[in-house]
């Protein structure tokens, strides 16, 4: 399922027009992104938790030359599925 499929599914399930469903889906994505970029986590009970994991700087190797290279520290978005989602999938 891609983003357009998700928007169509939301429109069909809620009775919204496709443009209203698109705005709703985009708003949810924007709210999650804004919360994560602000250092918060987003908990959706029964669905899962979106959070930010901090990766330390490390040393890696260039696969072509084999030379060591520095990999800078970064923040990575992370999702942990909740019990409701896990049960629905299994």
Image (cartoon, helix red, strand yellow):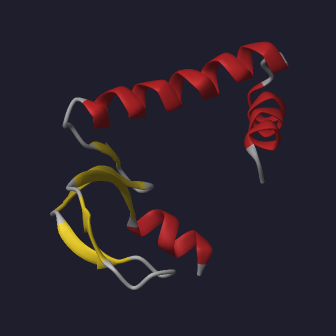
Camera-nearest residue between 20 and 70: 70
Q: Quadrant of the C terminus?
A: bottom right
- Seen as rendered, the residue at the extreme bottom is 66
Q: Height in image: 72 above or below 66?
A: above
Residue at 29 percent across and 33 percent down: it is 37
Whether residue 49 sits left or right of residue 85 in the image: it is left
Residue at 60 percent across and 24 percent down: it is 26
Residue at 22 percent across and 29 percent down: it is 38
Camera-nearest residue between 38 and 90: 38
Looking at the picture, how far across and down is residue 68, in whole percent? 28, 78
Looking at the picture, how far across and down is residue 3, in whole percent? 73, 40
Q: Height in image: 19 above or below 66?
A: above
Q: Height in image: 36 above or below 50?
A: above
Whether residue 7 sits left or right of residue 37 in the image: it is right
* Corner quadrant of residue 23: top right
- Seen as rendered, the residue at the extreme left is 56
Whether residue 36 sits left or right of residue 83 in the image: it is left
* Corner quadrant of residue 1: bottom right
Looking at the picture, how far across and down is residue 88, in whole percent? 58, 70
Total marks shown come to 0
Residue at 83 percent across and 34 percent down: it is 8
């Amino acid at each position: 399922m891609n983003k357009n499929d998700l928007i169509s599914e939301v429109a069909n399930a809620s009775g919204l027009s496709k443009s209203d469903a698109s705005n709703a889906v985009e708003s949810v994505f924007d709210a999650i992104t804004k919360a994560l970029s602000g250092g918060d986590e987003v908990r959706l009970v029964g669905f899962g938790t979106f959070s930010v994991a901090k990766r330390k700087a490390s040393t890696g190797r260039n696969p072509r030359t084999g030379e060591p290279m520095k990999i800078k520290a970064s923040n990575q978005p992370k999702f942990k599925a909740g019990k409701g989602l896990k049960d629905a999938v299994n």
